[in-house]
Image (cartoon, grey):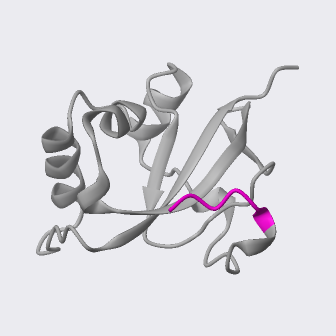
């Protein structure tokens, strides 16, 4: 269920500065291999700017999705070749966390700011 209207989104649960903090993820974003990130809360508004190592990225879309809805295309947006590798990576960051298909996450899609 994609929310197109920014006004329909619930309040943010964190700040954009915390959206991407893992160094390997930052490297993927800077190299253009990661164009989305999924979090258990909403960290940014559409149009908000994220700065990573001096480079600016604009948030284009924010919407909710279940883990069961993830496709290999979504995994590629995250910088992984397929869902299984993305899942293994996430579970390695969060030992003991179950991967529940019904669990909802917030998707934040972004692109480099064209200056």
Disc count in the image? 0
Q: Is residue 113 left or right of residue 23?
A: right
**Which residue of the protein is positioned furthest toward the right in this rendering?**
115
Q: Is residue 68 left or right of residue 48?
A: left
Q: Is residue 2 magenta?
A: yes
- Where 25 falls versus 30 (above or below)? below
Quarter holding residue 104: bottom left
Residue 27: x and y in percent read: 46, 29
What residue sits 76% from the left and 62% below the top? 5
User: What residue span does the magenta drawing correspond to?
Assistant: 1-6
Residue 6: x and y in percent read: 77, 63
- Where 104 falls versus 46 (above or below)? below
Closest to the observer, 7 or 79: 7
- Where 94 falls versus 23 (above or below)? below
What residue sits 23% from the left and 27% below the top? 81
- Name the quarter where the C terminus is drawn: top right
Q: Is residue 4 magenta?
A: yes
Residue 24: x and y in percent read: 37, 36
Q: Is residue 100 left or right of residue 66?
A: left
Q: Is residue 67 left or right of residue 57?
A: left
Residue 93: x and y in percent read: 24, 59
**Which residue of the protein is positioned furthest toward the front in this rendering?**
1
Quarter holding residue 112: top right
């Amino acid at each position: 269920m994609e929310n197109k209207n920014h006004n329909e989104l619930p309040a943010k649960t964190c700040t954009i500065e915390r959206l991407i903090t893992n160094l390997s993820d930052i490297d993927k974003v800077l190299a253009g291999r990661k164009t989305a990130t999924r979090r258990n809360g909403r960290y940014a508004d559409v149009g908000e700017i994220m700065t990573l190592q001096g480079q600016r990225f604009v948030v284009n879309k924010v919407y909710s999705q279940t883990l069961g809805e993830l496709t290999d295309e979504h995994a590629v947006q995250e910088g992984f070749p397929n869902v299984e590798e993305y899942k293994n990576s996430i579970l390695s960051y969060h030992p003991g966390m179950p991967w529940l298909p019904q669990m909802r996450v917030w998707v934040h899609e972004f692109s480099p700011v064209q200056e």
